[in-house]
Amino acid sequence: MNDRIPDLDLAIDLIVQQIQRLLIDRDTPILIALDGGSGSGKSTLALLVAQALAAAVVHGDDFFAADITDAEWETRTPEARAASVIDWQRLRFEALEPLLAGVPAQWHTFDFTAGKLSDGTYTMRTDFVKCEPKAVIVLDGAYAMHHELTDLINYSVLLNVPVEVRHERLTAREDKVFLADWHARWDDVEHSYFTYLRPESFDLVVTNQTIR
């Protein structure tokens, strides 16, 4: 399909229409993947789609690979970082597969505020995110259409926002020191993923630059 839609409201309407069609005569949940670079507006679109479809939302960032140290990241190529940035198995087993089976899911999230541990790895929150199953599940996050997950996904959306627009948004909302480190480590990874590694086509491409 790979439709390119520049308007946000039109994109939401099209997603809702397509998912409602997929739900006809279906007795198992549907998984929507919302993929795009950092700052492209995935979380905003995920919220709006979830509201329209009474869907459950899973944030891919919750499953950042916290057990990999900064030193280890530095030794890896952009392609290798993209392959391991998310704990794919935990995302599948703790969140997506239970919800797709129609049972509640729970998981510990990556703690973005706690910083690094003494061994250079990162902290996970001790409390659980709990998610009830719904007819529609929205997976929101960069790398959501990575090949580790595509066998589970029924409908895919790419937010294709120019890098300069995305970076401007990140600058407005993130700590300056954190963001400098983040750009140094992940800009090449996102470029590699969205240029070479992602699937050749998405069901829908949203190009609206006003989504935040």
Image (tube, rainbow, N blue to C red):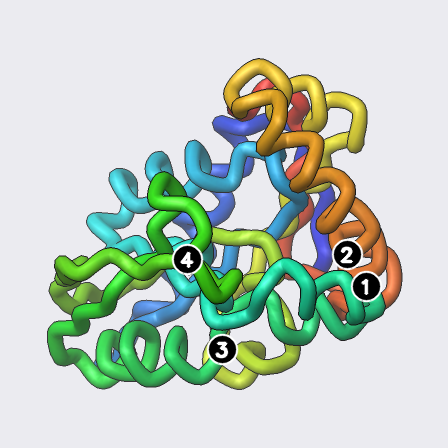
Q: Is residue 6 above or below residue 58?
A: above
Q: Which residue bears the numbered disc 1?
A: 78
* Sequence-wise first label, 3 or 4: 3
At numbered mark 3, what does the secondary structure look like: helix, strand or loop? helix
Q: CA distance from mark 1 to mark 4?
A: 24 Å
Image quadrant where one finds the N terminus: bottom right
Q: Position of residue 187 (x, y in %)?
A: 77, 45
Q: Which residue bears the numbered disc 3?
A: 88
Q: Which residue bears the numbered disc 4?
A: 117
Amino acid identity at mark 1: Pro
Residue at 60 percent of width and 66 percent of height: 85
At numbered mark 2, what does the secondary structure look like: helix, strand or loop? helix
Q: Residues within 10 Å of mark 4 (few under 14, many from 20)?
A: few
Residue at 19 percent of width and 64 percent of height: 134
Q: Nearer the viewer, residue 147 or 28?
A: 147
The label shown at residue 162 is none
